[in-house]
Image: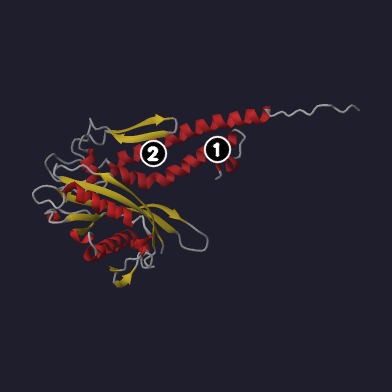
Amino acid sequence: MAISSECRVDLSGWEAKSTRIKHALSEALKEAIEYGMDELSRKVTQNLGGMRHKAGTRSPYPGKIPVTMISGNLHQAVRARRLDFARGVVYIDKNKAPYAVYVHYGTHKMRPRRFMSDAVAERREAIINRQRYLIKLKIRKAGGNPSEILGL
Amino acid sequence: MAIRRKYSVSDVQKVIHALIAKLISATAPWSSWQAVYGYPEGEVFNFTKLLVYIDTPIKTGTITHQGGRPAVTMEITLGCWNSGGDEGTGGVEECDIAAGHLLDLFGDVDVYNTQFTVTLGATTYTNKTLYDHGIIVTGSTGPRNIPVEDPLEYRREITASLIVTF
């Protein structure tokens, strides 16, 4: 029986797995960001979808969420977009509803209705949990161990 | 631990308001300002003094641990509102000083040294600290510049993050 004179070190399997996991991670990140933006937009829109009342009349529910509507412009002004690979933003289109900031932070005559920060506070935990699940799932499907990779 | 679980929102707001009110009653430069519980209503907008308002806290999460009742994490917004007009009391600089003091208060262990008196439900807690009430401060962020309608008014907000234990 011949003994080989060379000892081969082959990391091609590890490299292939590493590439698979990297790809899975980037896919998962994309999905997680999309989910976060969708969920937050949905909640913000819900917070802005109160009952309608006539222009020039006081809100029947001052300072309360959901924000009551007159024209409905603010309700339709919720936008979301990706900033880059790992970041997205949910915002109000200022051209559609330039008064959004006054509704959110309040004025002398109007109590604040923090439709954005309330939505973040309310959905943050759920969004993070879901994002964590999505990322773990993708890594596991690619053959990786989420605990080792993410330290979770 | 004085905070009642079912009344945690109003109790935390009352405790933080009592803390700020105590500082305002006793310490410079806090004594130049006035504390308002909740969002300032129309009648307080005379701006003889800068307003420090303590808005309603929001629950942001739960911290569970084995063998005990879970604590909750909360965020509370504190704002400064000042006028630089004819009735002004320092304008934008005063507003920034107040915001800086609020930020520093919640970013320093000194926040646990101040003793204050607060009534929660039917019970009055005399000369207790924030820690006695089961509130731990984990940080503060801001100040955010808040747009106002009057160009001679200035408004800033900071957010303090808290852990509330019961």
Judging depth in this view, the residue of B61 and B103 nearest the camera is B103
Q: Residues within 10 Å of mark 1 (few under 14, many from 20)?
A: some
**Chain label for disc 2:** A
Quadrant hosting residue B32: bottom left
* Type of amino acid under label 2: Glu
Percent position of residue B100, x then y:
28, 51
Q: Does the image show residue A139? A: yes
Residue A135: give x, y in percent of width and height. Answer: 52, 37
Q: Earlier in the sequence, mark 2 or mark 1?
A: 2
Q: Which residue is mark 2?
A: A39
| Same chain? Circles 2 and 1 | yes
> Which residue is most to the left?
B86
Taking the spot 10% from the left edge, 47% from the top edge, the residue there is B85
Residue, disc 1? A137
In screen coordinates, is A111 left or right of A83? left
- Calculate the distance from the C-alpha at mark 2 to the C-alpha at mark 1: 19 Å
Question: What's the mark number on residue B136?
Answer: none
Horizontal and vertical percent for residue B37?
23, 59
Residue drawn at 36 percent across, 47 percent down: A121
Q: Viewer-proximal residue, B22 or B100?
A: B100
Which residue does the image show at 11% across and 41% down from the upper left? A56
Q: Is residue B39 above or below residue B121?
A: above
* Residue under the image location 45 percent in, 59 percent down: B70
The kind of secondary structure element at disc 1 is: helix
